[in-house]
Image (cartoon, helix red, strand yellow):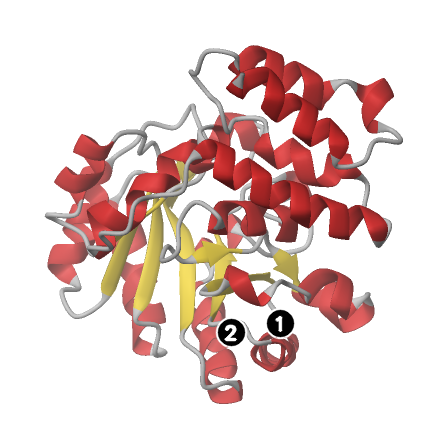
Amino acid sequence: MMDWTDRHCRYFHRRLTRHARLYTEMVTAPALEHGDVPRHLDFDPSEQPVALQLGGSDPAMLARAARLGERWGYDEINLNCGCPSERVRTGSFGACLMAEPALVADCVRAMRDAVGLPVTVKHRIGLDANQDYGFVRDFVGVVADAGCDVFIVHARNAVLKGLSPKENREVPPLRYEVVHRLKRDFPARTIVLNGGLADWRAIERELEVVDGVMLGRTAYHDPAFLAQVDSRLYGDERPPRTRAAVAESMIEYAAAQVARGTPLRAIVRHMLGLYHGMSGGRRYRQVLSEARRLKDAGPELLREALAEVER
């Protein structure tokens, strides 16, 4: 979720679900080694539980990055072995690491030795045209032996040449049966399914087979979908917040952030789908997408958009 699940996005999503675990966009270990650590790692305490997703392939550097994540208060360290973008491949991390399970195992071992947090791995089910189940089974087996107990599995191959990151989320076919088979072969490990989940019937069906689900595009483009998570999956009987209540709370947040110099656009871009499929939703999105007004706008623009859809 690079460039998507930043701190403003996660704060917004936490207004919709009290319990779901949120994940950062991928932060590379070199960026933490040489860059602005607070800019990459700061988050609002209300986002918890929140996991820090790291990218990298140097065990020692990842261990130092994991220590920073623990010091900052994250609840989990997740190693990305699934991102297929060109800029990730050239850095020798992301999905290409699935071809080097021993190196991933070394990275996991180094991070586990460095922190007391859970260290988890997100990956694909294969690379390029290779649909051999043995490839992903052996990858999980080697990394599990290094102490990884949780595997978040995007149920598509990653095509490293010829497809864009967007196409990699849509073109390779979903093969949930591969993830189901991993759960049968590794019953003691937590297997989380990711990819293409967009309705509750499908989610509940998959949860009869695997241990958890991760939502990406559905949660981003139709964020109100998250409002049902707490009651359906966590047994929380409190009524979910209404869209209007969520938007009102974001007006307060936006006011505080804009006062610190954060552009309003950085916040409201994550909120465009809040009224997805609702009457007035198109006008709501239009108000929050007008570049000319967003340039110097304050939280009053969000209040205007809310008035358009709720009147």
Q: Is residue 129 visible?
A: no
Q: Which mark is residue 308?
A: none
Choose between 82 and 280: the one closer to the eye.
280
Q: CA distance from mark 1 to mark 2?
A: 7 Å
- Number of other residues with Cα within 10 Å of mark 2, as a class: few under 14, some 14 to 19, many 20 or more: many
Q: Earlier in the sequence, mark 1 or mark 2?
A: 1
Question: Could you tell me the amino acid type at mark 2?
Answer: Cys
Task: Return the x and y of residue 110 as percentages of the image width and height.
Answer: 51, 82
* Discs 1, 2 touching: Cβ within 8 Å: yes
Tag 2 residue: 107
Q: Quadrant of residue 290?
A: top right
Name which residue lies at 25% across and 57% down: 191
Q: Indicate whether 35 appears above or below 3.
A: below
For the N terminus, the quadrant is top right
Question: Element at badge 1?
Answer: loop
Task: Return the x and y of residue 189 as percentages of the image width and height.
Answer: 22, 67
Horizontal arrangement in the rendering, residue 137 relative to residue 300 (left or right): left
Q: Quadrant of residue 267?
A: top right
Q: Indicate whether 25 appears above or below 244.
A: below
Question: Could you tell me the amino acid type at mark 1?
Answer: Asp
Q: Indicate whether 102 appears above or below 3.
A: below
Horizontal arrangement in the rendering, residue 31 relative to residue 233 (left or right): right
Name which residue lies at 61% across and 43% down: 250
Tag 1 residue: 58
Horizontal arrangement in the rendering, residue 294 relative to residue 177 (left or right): right
Choose between 132 and 2: the one closer to the eye.
2
Name which residue lies at 76% across and 51% down: 257
